[in-house]
Image (cartoon, rainbow, N blue to C red):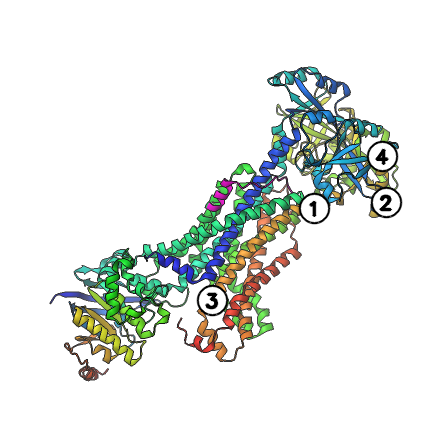
Amino acid sequence: MRFSAIAWRSLTARPARTLLTGFGVALGVALVAGTLLAADAATRAVSLAAEELYGQADLRVRAFEADGFSAESVAQINALPGVAIAAPLAERRLTLSTQPGPDEAVFTLAAIGVDPAAEAALERPTLASGSPLSADRPNDALVGAGWAAGYGLGIGDELLLDGAKLDMPPLTIVGLLADTGVGAENGGAVILLAGETLNAAFFLPSPVTAVDLAVEEGRMDEVQSGLDRSLTEPFTVETVADAEAAFGRAQAGFSGIAFLLGLVALSAAAFLVANTLTMTLTERTREIGLLRAAGATAGQIRGLVLRQGLALGVVGSLLGLPLGVGVGAVLVTAVASQRAALVTDLRVDPLSLLFAFGLGLAVTVVAGAVPAFEAARVSPLEALHPSGRPSGRLWSRLRWIVVLELAVVAAGFLLYPLDRGAPPVAATLLAVGLLVGGAVATGFVLDPLGRLVGAPFERLFGATGLLGRANLGRDRARTGMSVAALTIALAAVVTLATTAASARGTADRWVSSILPGGHAIRLTVPSSMDALQQTISETPGTKSATPVPQFNVVATVAGEGSEAAVAGIDPSIWQDEGTLIIDADRAGAFEALRGGGAVLVPESFANRTGVATGDLVHLAIPSGPEGDFTVAGVVAYSVPGRNGEGSLLVSLSDARTIFGAELATTWAMVPQPEVGDDAYVQLVADKATQLAGEALTAEQLADQLARSLDRLLGLFDALALLAVVIGGFGIVNTLTLGVAERTREIAVLRAHGMTVGQVEGMVVTEAAIMGTVGGIVAAAAGVAVTGLLVTLAPRDFAAGLVVPWPMVLAVILLGLAVASIAGLYPARLAGNRPVLASLKHFE
Amino acid sequence: MTVILEARDLVKRYPVGDGEVEALSGVSLAVERGEFLAIMGASGSGKSTLLHLLGGLDRPSTGEVVIDGVDISTLNDEQATLTRRDKTGFVFQFFNLIPLLSVRENVALPFLIGGGSAGEHAERVNQLLDMVGLTGKADNAPDQLSAGEQQRVALARALATEPALLLADEPTGNLDYTTGGEILDLLWHSCVQLGQTIVLVTHEARAAAYADRVLVVRDGAILDEIALGRRPDHDPGQLLARLATLGL
């Protein structure tokens, strides 16, 4: 046996504690590994989705204007030299229903009309099951597999087209689209059918919005120049890389936030390791004194403790890897089933596992370094005759934990592959810093908060409560570190909940700002504003109905041009009925719009181009109308555009007179004041049905946004709750040691008549107070973190900080519950020690 | 006879509140190789403080401690530790053994600390176990031994490397009369048979009576020095009489 074997024996002498700590590390590493693997699946899904969307096509030629390419343009594209396959795509929104009856369901889907032969030639779409479309069967349809499963639909089911010609037969589902590629469009609510069938079903043809091209080998340049030469209508050209970038932007935050939660869990595990080794050090102080007296150097003592940290790190991290694969699999399955983000099958990526292992090891070794250096600093004399009181001030014992934990988190984040779409580094580091700092602050507020929280326990439980509360102050650093692990996890839960609430508040505000009156009708195809104005305005209960024509332009600022979406709005209606958030004099801005030649720009456009109120923007439809517009103001939110940036807003009059806009898909509906909201919803719905469109309300839109957000955050909550479990382990460890230290003291209490139940209650009360204090600090830290995020990203949180107080209270109660449960085992230990033997116990 | 341990004008002060307390005030002594010295005094007299300084567990505020020619009072922690490893062995009143190690491994601890293994020094370890009468319990855990047996193991460990100096701090303080006597007999045996130099701190006259010479400490200073000589009967009578004249 060698001297270093003392390190391993020390770990095996307390198997329960070592196992709990090792498992805590394993859970932390598992969460990091699992989130990395899920992020890998999301990243690959983005590439796969783009590839599947295009199939064998090389280019997508997209019409610049919303009413699509004319038939002549489509023919020109088809005829271009060098084009091997041309696949036109006609898009519109469809309202469909199942067969009439008690279970009839109505859906609004994004419909894409295709040429089945061209699609087959391009080897797409990717099907989850069933058969592709065929030219021989014009009424076949393909729908998204995930969407269909959500509504209990499958192969063989029929769908009726609402608003179609009377003799239109139903569509039959013959195949289910995989959830990547075209099946991911419109959140999976998509239907593919033969373009001829789509055109035949309605009196108004569906616009061919794009034509996908497979280009012969080596003739790309020829095709590109052919397009420039031949097409008279404005167009853009997109590639697979463009599609991949668009998908990636849509789920950029998912990977980063998931990894961040993994880091939070690992930080909790780090506190657990530091606490465990510190407790081991406390227990073995006299042994350390003996070793030092016998000639063991400070370095040898440091080495013993570091070896223990390393052992815990290696074993825990190794165990965490297979667990991490499991976590990743569960995460991918959950994300896929909830369509929270694009994911593909889990791949066990060795690099991700290696990274998780390395990070776990680094964190635990660093966490073990603090007690190791503490142990080495203790003089042999002090160790041989310990005072029983914790040495050193609280901050001096905790500060190195703070510094080292933040350093490890920062290192982990800086090493994280940022191409997987991490959130802003600085903001995230600050957020994690706040979480860790809040956790560490627990040690400092333990006394005052413990007294406050403990007061009701004393009142309710008498001596049991009093002693439970008093025991908190025994070793504030140790107790503080135990609670810190729980606090950091609870704070993550609060952060998620508060972020969701703030985002929902912002979504509500966003929706109401772009939908004056709170109601709208969305038609399936762009339709003549003049033709429909009277019909729509005559909707019962309507004060005003205004179209919102949308079209694409090239916006030039200071000589730099870029594609932008434009929407025409009625300034008077939007000023009186809407809540558009304008960074300028509101009345003046709308007055300028009414006067003509003015534009409101969305904040994202202003940030990208550097344009400000008073600047000039040149707007032009390629080869078409153009004009100079003065920026009348910057809006926080705007009508969504095709490029996801938000539309530039001009007056409806300018849209008509300068740009010749005649068609609109969306109509904003303002009810008369005396009409009840529920009644008006039905009236608008009836009108929409008449026009084969769909009725929208601000509540519905906000709800849709909230639901997709909730799906994502629900997954993250699950990860955070796993981190809470790690925190619970820390409480078990600390209380178990505390009970061991108080063996004789507990025996004296028992000798004086305290029952087993009262002793157990004392320990559980101590745990409950710890958990409650942790929950309160977590609530403050979590809200502070969200406040920081709101401040750093004001556009994403225009409604400001919204605190879900019931949820915050629930988290505090969760802290109390988890800690109380964690206290049950040490409570049982305390209650069952034999009194006489315990009185003779030498501490 | 060679002087193996020498202390010159040792002073030890401790900060207490805003001031200081002087636990030792100018203590000087010398111990010859093979001598058995006892340091006696009441609780708080400074005897344990003196022992800690002599063994290099603590550093004096002023003064020097020289063990086997090495001035340990100016060494840094690392150097003092290595010197302690080579030149001293300790027996304490309480908690002497490492609970994680077996009896054999506890005896071999000085070798383990020095980088060796228990197996490499098995012969020496067995010899020591035999000396203290615990060969049959070599593989037991400390909690399987009585207090007296644990203290015997501690003594065997302290003698493992044949240190220049063995320092014992109230080794019988936690033992009953008979068991305490067994430990004192072992100490005396190691001194007489093996030539081990021993410094024993005690408040018991019975224990001090085993020594060749007794230093009486009071209030941080040496009050008296009593030469007893090497006596196999260890009769404390002479010592008690002398202590009585000192008012102790």
- Residue A606 shows up from this direction: no
- Chain for numbered disc 3: A
How many numbered marks have been drawn onto this rendered protein structure? 4
**Residue type highlighted by circle 3:** Gly
Position of residue A485 measured from the top left corner of the image (x, y, whole percent): 52, 56
Identify the residue at image location x=53%, y=69%: A828
Which amino acid is tagged 1?
Arg
Residue that mark 1 sits on = A707
Disc number lying in front (2 or 4) = 2
| Side (left or right) of A108 relative to A796 | right
Query: Is tag 3's residue or tag 4's residue first in the polypeptide sequence?
Result: 4
- Can residue A512 be found in the magenta stretch? no
Q: Is residue A353 magenta?
A: yes
Q: Are marks 4 and 1 in contact (CB under 8 Å)?
A: no
Distance between the Cα atoms at labels 1 and 2? 29 Å
Which residue has dot 4 on it? A163
Ranked by sequence position, the earlier of labels 1 and 3 is: 1
Dot 4: element:
loop
Mark 2: few, some, or many residues within 10 Å (few <14, many ≥20)?
few
Q: Residue furthest left?
A: B1
Side (left or right) of B55 relative to A446: left
User: What residue is disc 2 on?
Assistant: A101
Point out the residue furthest to the front here.
B136
Same chain under badges 4 and 1? The reply is yes
